[in-house]
Image (spheres, grey):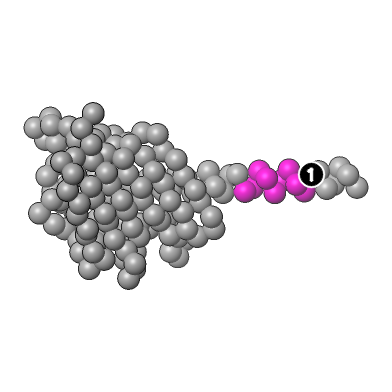
Amino acid sequence: MKLILTLCLLLTFIFAHTQTNNDSIAIVKLLDKAATTFRAGDGKGYADCWHVQPYSVIFISTADGKSIEIPASALGKSSAASGQGGFATATKYRMSIHGESGWTSFDEISTAKDGTKSYSHEVWMVEKINGDWKLVAASMHFYKP
């Protein structure tokens, strides 16, 4: 009996860990797609990363101390900031996933086409919609190293 209980607990743990790991991978892929499509100016691809809700928002703190709020009505759409090219490298991922929602934070170094780098600490909120992870909100804090 103890063996069966131990096996059931072990299998439950393995399944839960595997599912969380699969979700973590899917969320990182979503963030990569969002970064790539935004920089490429691919409005349709970028919009596909989002599930805009009434509470959706992006808060941005600039490196010079300003604050910007991008409301739900503007999310998942092309803007003057998109399509500028370049690439981003994210490191130090931290995640919390609970069922159909979660958040991830990471550090990002963005490199513009001209080689200029910008640095940020970011937190992104995600929700699983019809089996796919989607962005719903973010907070980005730029800084000078």
Placement of 79 over or under 95, stated as above or below: below
Q: Does the magenta stretch include residue 62?
A: no
- Residue at x 36%, y 51% (from the top left corner): 124
- Residue at x 60%, y 44% (from the top left corner): 17
- Residue 80: x %, y % from top left: 10, 54
Q: Which of 44 and 135 is in front in this view?
A: 135
Magenta segment, principal secondary structure?
helix
Q: Nearer the viewer, residue 99 or 44?
A: 99
Placement of 115 over or under 17, stated as above or below: above
Query: Would residue 88 be seen by someone viewing this image from the given angle?
Result: no
Q: In this view, does 131 lie to the left or right of 85?
A: right
Q: Which amino acid does label 1 sit on?
A: Leu
Give the labeled residue for mark 1: 7
- Residue at x 44%, y 40% (from the top left corner): 94
Instruction: Tell which residue pokes out farthest to the front in this image.
Output: 65
Query: Would residue 27 be seen by someone viewing this image from the given angle?
Result: yes
Q: Quadrant of the C terminus?
A: top left
- Residue 50: x %, y % from top left: 31, 60
- Residue 100: x %, y % from top left: 50, 60
Q: What element carries label 1?
A: helix
Q: In this view, does 64 lie to the left or right of 47?
A: left
Q: Which of 89 and 103 is in front in this view?
A: 103
Q: Does the magenta stretch include residue 15?
A: yes
Structural crowding at the residue carrying mark 1, measured as other residues with C-alpha within 10 Å and reported as few (<14), some (14–19) or many (≥20): few
- Residue 45: x %, y % from top left: 25, 55
Q: Total number of numbered labels?
A: 1
Magenta part of the protein: which range? 7-16
Q: Is residue 34 left or right of residue 15?
A: left
Instruction: Tell which residue pokes out farthest to the right in this image.
Output: 1
- Residue at x 19%, y 35% (from the top left corner): 118
Write down the quadrant of residue 91 in the picture: top left
